[in-house]
Amino acid sequence: MIHLAIATPHSSPPCGDACPSPAEQHPLGYWLSGGLIILLAAASAAGLFIPGLYHDTPNWIAQTRGTDLVTLVVAIPALAASLILAARGSPRAQITWLGVLGYIFYMYVVYTFDVAFNWLFLA
């Protein structure tokens, strides 16, 4: 016989207060995202503060530097905040975390195919 547990907004989880947090259930994703924050900060800071890093047209250099700035000011704090809140069990934070990871994936796919090769590709 199959028993299905249906959660309602007012029901408590089946394990009560002893439920492990999402970070305890799936720690690899949280650890990888924490490492990603460090790598993003290093790559974006290098793109902003190392002159001559990008060897592209002036228009494309301006766009990549703008993307680096948005990554430092918006994406990294959003990833860190959503990571912390998702680890505490917030479903909204988990969706935000996934959205920020999607932005980062899209951004670096564009970088892979459109930015001229430089020494950061080897890092």
Image (tube, rainbow, N blue to C red):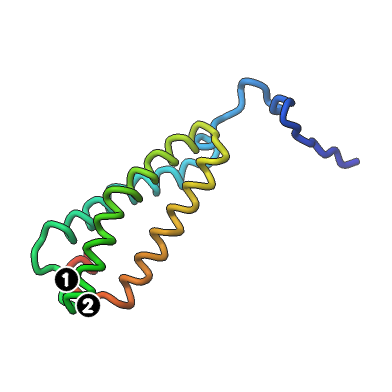
Residue 92, labelled with which disc?
none
Instruction: Classify 107 as above or below 57.
Output: above
> Where residue 19 sits: x, y (%)?
61, 27
Taking the image as shown, residue 3 lies to the left or right of residue 120, namely right
- Most distant residue in the left direction: 51
Query: Which residue corresponds to the image point at 29% horizontal and 55% vertical from the top-left?
Result: 70
* Residue with the most extreme top position: 17
Quadrant housing the N terminus: top right
Residue 99 to residue 23: above or below:
below
User: Is residue 115 rendered to the left or right of residue 88?
Assistant: left
Which percent across, then down, holds residue 69? 24, 55
| Quadrant in which the C terminus appears | bottom left
Residues at circles 2 and 1 in contact by the CB criterion of under 8 Å: yes
> Which quarter of the picture shows residue 60?
bottom left
Give the quadrant of residue 120.
Answer: bottom left
Circle 1 SS class: loop
Q: Residue at x 8, y 64 (%)?
A: 51
Q: Position of residue 92 (x, y in %)?
A: 55, 41
Amino acid type of the residue that numbered disc 1 sits on in the rendered structure: Tyr
Give me the disc on residue 54.
1
Where does the image place residue 20, in percent across and percent down from the top left?
Answer: 57, 29
Secondary structure, mark 2, is loop
Q: Is residue 70 left or right of residue 28?
A: left
Query: What residue sits 21% from the left and 53% below the top?
Result: 42
Is tag 2's residue or tag 1's residue first in the polypeptide sequence? 1
The amino acid at mark 2 is: Ala
Mark pair 2, 1: CA separation: 7 Å
Nearer to me, 39 or 114 = 114
Taking depth in this image into account, of 86 and 2 the one nearest to the observer is: 86
Q: How many numbered tags mark residues here?
A: 2
Residue depicted at x 82% and y 39%: 4
Q: In the rendered image, which residue does mark 2 sit on?
A: 116
